[in-house]
Amino acid sequence: MSDDPLTYTQVAAEEGLGDWRMMFQTLETRFDTGDFATGLALVARIGEAAEELGHHPELDLRFSTLHVRLISRDVFGVTRRDLDLARRISALAAEAGVTADPGAVEIVELALDTTDHAEVKPFWRTVLGYDDHPLHDREVRDLTGIGPAMWFQHTDPHAPPVQRFHLDVRVPPEVAGPRIEAALAAGGTLVSDEHAPAFTVLADAQGNKACITTGLGRD
């Protein structure tokens, strides 16, 4: 059915979505508009298409770029409604001579190591002014999509809490390799690529860890 959430693999198999990348529960891209007037005109045309289809995007217009996020929030995922709107938006951008740069999209998550996420989740949800993730118990979210997500990673109670927080950076698959190589060239070290391309663990020169993640291998 058109309202069923689609998996990463299902979306990747669809045609006509070269401008777009599925991140977590969203389909996203960034358009290089070149100037504010062009971006504003494109926003107006996207708005007309959204009204026609009865489904609406989340837009972030800057001077020379337009970031577009698609999600069916009633099911908190990507559905056929989002694919239809994505194709329409790509066509409108092409008509306006605007090119997409989907490799520019990314999502930053905060990850906290904990032996008992239920004990600390209410505190962090309240401090951040977030809500529970609709699908995942070990995560709190700004449901407007503006603030970074925060999730709670289970830790062995006997493990020493050397580093409690780390960043997860979700990028399109084609960006992960170059991003990792650049991080290593910038003084980082490879901790583990056992689970690549789903995630690769890196560390800075002082041992602080971060993960470069993609949607591959997660369905």
Image (spheres, grey):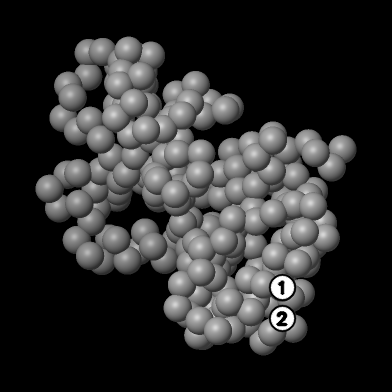
Residue 140 appears in the picture as rendered: yes
Give the side of residue 27 with respect to residue 189, left or right.
right
Task: Measure how far apart labels 2 and 1 are at the Cα level.
Answer: 12 Å
Instruction: Look at 69% across and 34% down and name the residue there.
Output: 75
Residue that carries the numbered disc 1 in the rendered image: 45
Amino acid carrying mark 1 in the image: Arg
Disc 1 residue crowd, few under 14, some 14–19, many 20+, Cα 10 Å: some
Residue 37 in picture, x, y percent from top left = 55, 84
Residue 88 in picture, x, y percent from top left = 78, 67
> Looking at the image, which is closer to me, 74 or 40?
40
Residue 126 occupies quadrant: top left
Residue lying furthest left in this view? Answer: 206
Residue that carries the numbered disc 2 in the rendered image: 94
Mark 2, secondary structure of its residue:
helix
Amino acid carrying mark 2 in the image: Ala
Count of all numbered marks drawn on residues in the image = 2
Q: Quadrant of the C terminus?
A: top right
Is residue 146 shown above or below 122? Answer: below
